[in-house]
Amino acid sequence: MLGVTVVIPLYNKENYIKRAVQSVLSQTVQTFEIVIIDDGSTDNSYNIVAEIRDPRIRVIQQNNAGASAARNRGIEEAKTSLIAFLDADDEWKPTFLETVFHLIEKYPEAGAYATAYQIILQNGRKITPKIESIPPIPWEGLIDQYCKSVLRDLPIISSAVVIPKKTFEKVGLFAINHHHGEDQDMWFRISVHDQIAYSHTNQVTYYRGLPNSMCTILHTSQPYPIIETIKNSLRSKEVEASNELREYLAKLELDYADRLIKTNRLKEGLSLVKGMSTKRYKVKKLKIFFLFLKQMLLTALGWDIRMTQK
């Protein structure tokens, strides 16, 4: 019987953490342990999980170091050979682990196992991601062209993936001291070395835009680690310089340039966009040029242009 360690990074999610844990406890497959890494929460999050009585749950406290550091700590603490991740404000459908274990039995050679997911916005609106190059629901199999699959919505998120511990021994742990792109960095690194098995069925609910979620906060202290990973892989010729990979890199850099401009690092953002070549994202590139001009105008008028992203 397969067993899995469910790693839940926890930081100030007192209103959601119980829902996340309960979604694990409600799985149709019960061979798991739960490792909750309380990453320096300052609200009532720790007390809430400490009150959940189940011998399979371990709660480990550490000073705040970010989601990647919490995930890495969970990997190190895991007692099983399979690691699953669940963000503290997301939840699994009851059949998530059952679906993944089926994939593992069918594709034991894969480096990771993932499922599709549904997005729910803060206003309650539901969104079904549009995944490119992966056959429609209810397809399952090995992702054939990973770099093509990420050109629209992302096929893989951190709350909908299970990874064998041996994969981390091959590709390393999550990049720390970053606030964006560290999860995409991990999936890309895995795709370079192994295939990823995928079930195109909705097994996870991803809540976007909740308080203290990384997608609601702008950080620009460093480029996304995935950007540097792709560039290094191209330089070392570890991967082929395909059109899909180059467009994926352009997509990431445009997103980073957008964040730079929105946090008043205008010259850096403009420089990144000017040096970029893309056919697929020409409109997005043009929109960022207009954003730059708008921000320049606001600066000239003396307005505070710092913005937060929803």
Image (cartoon, rainbow, N blue to C red):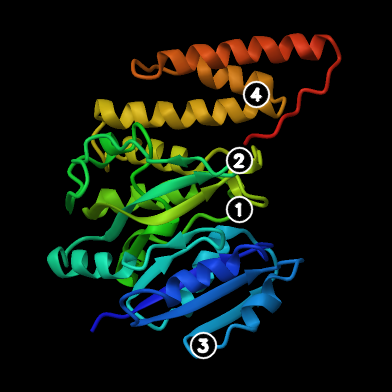
Which residue is located at x 62 percent, y 36 percent?
310
- Foreground disc of the pair 4, 3: 3
* Type of amino acid under label 1: Asn
* Type of amino acid under label 2: Gln
Secondary structure state at the residue bearing disc 1: loop
Q: How many marks?
A: 4
Disc ID at residue 222: 2
Q: Is 240 on the left or on the right of 309, as rendered?
A: left
Mark 4–mark 2 Cα distance, whole angstroms, equals 14 Å
- Foreground disc of the pair 4, 2: 4
Q: Earlier in the sequence, mark 4 or mark 1?
A: 1
* Type of amino acid under label 4: Ile
Disc ID at residue 261: 4
Mark 4–mark 1 Cα distance, whole angstroms, equals 21 Å
Which residue is located at x 58 percent, y 72 percent?
37
Which residue is located at x 27 percent, y 65 percent?
100
Q: Disc 1 designates what residue?
A: 177
* Type of amino acid under label 3: Asp
Q: CB atoms at circles 1 and 2 under 8 Å apart?
A: yes
Secondary structure state at the residue bearing disc 4: helix
Mark 4–mark 3 Cα distance, whole angstroms, equals 47 Å
Does residue 275 show up?
A: no
Q: Quadrant of the rendered structure where residue 161 is?
A: bottom left
Q: Position of residue 105 (x, y in %)?
A: 16, 70
